[in-house]
Amino acid sequence: MELNVTISIDDLHPEKGWGCEGDESVGYLKELNKEFGCKFNLFIPSNYHNQYPISEHKDWIDFWLDKDWIELSAHGHYHMCNDKEKFGECEFFEINTQEEANNRIKQCLSEWSMVGYVPNGWRNPGWLAHPESIKIIDKSFEYVALHNEHNHQVQWDSKMFFGHDGINETDSIDIWNTDTFMFQSHIAGDWNDNCWVEENYLNFQNILHYLSTQYNLSYKTIKEL
């Protein structure tokens, strides 16, 4: 039986330790591509925490675009909120008007335009989005990658891909979207349990070894699904 495997990684930005050349985590991705043929969707905020505008780091974007096993996708603009206590980093959940959402998406896409790349896909920063923000996001991207529990049964006009099994999972792995193992992870962060540290890398390696004994696996980016 043939099934797809897609692997998403959130929050990459041009800060050492968060997806830069030479990072230990980047080495793990290269090894998985070499061993299995893994491909990855990198979900990148266009100006993470208002400190890392990608327009000032085109060399970093080019570092990733040079790899044919990578798709770059949008993950908000600032990935932060004015009211952190109330909204955490759910940027587009705090934004509750179409006008403000439209302005923020324009900022996001302007950053991408300045590095010569247009992302096809989107994931909500913090995984939540206000219904008014969704109306604007829907117009700007071909697909959205979603966590089924956080989406609250919202219907998007964009093509929806659900799935959130972590690279750290040990109990069960589900088939999403009828034919796909859809893994989700974070590149780093002390508050995430599915980031790319050695323990999770080795666990995920074992997952792929097991799945490859049960299925004919085809590794794809979300755009290729």
Image (tube, helix red, strand yellow):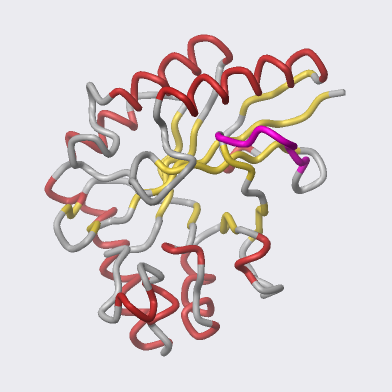
Q: Looking at the picture, does residue 173 appear above or below residue 142?
A: above
How many marks can you see? 0
Q: Please determine whether, in this image, residue 84 is positioned above or below residue 10.
A: below
Q: Could you say where residue 163 lies in the image, as x and y percent from the top left?
A: 66, 49
Q: Is 134 left or right of 181, judged from the image as shown?
A: left
> Within the magenta stretch, is there residue 174?
yes
Foreground residue among 51 and 144: 51
Q: Residue at x 50, y 74 (%)?
A: 129
Q: Is residue 216 magenta?
A: no
- Residue 193 located left or right of residue 222: left
Residue 145 is situated, as x and y percent measured from the top left of the image, at 57, 54
Judge left or right: residue 1 versus residue 80.
right
Residue 82 vs residue 52, the one in the foreground = 82
Question: Residue shown at 48%/24% (left/top)?
Answer: 201
Q: Where is residue 136 in the image (x, y as percent from the top left)?
A: 47, 77
Looking at the rendering, in which quadrant would you find the C terminus?
Answer: top right
Residue 84 or residue 112, whichever sits in front: 84
Helix, strand or loop for the magenta stretch, by majority: loop
The region drawn magenta spans: 168-175
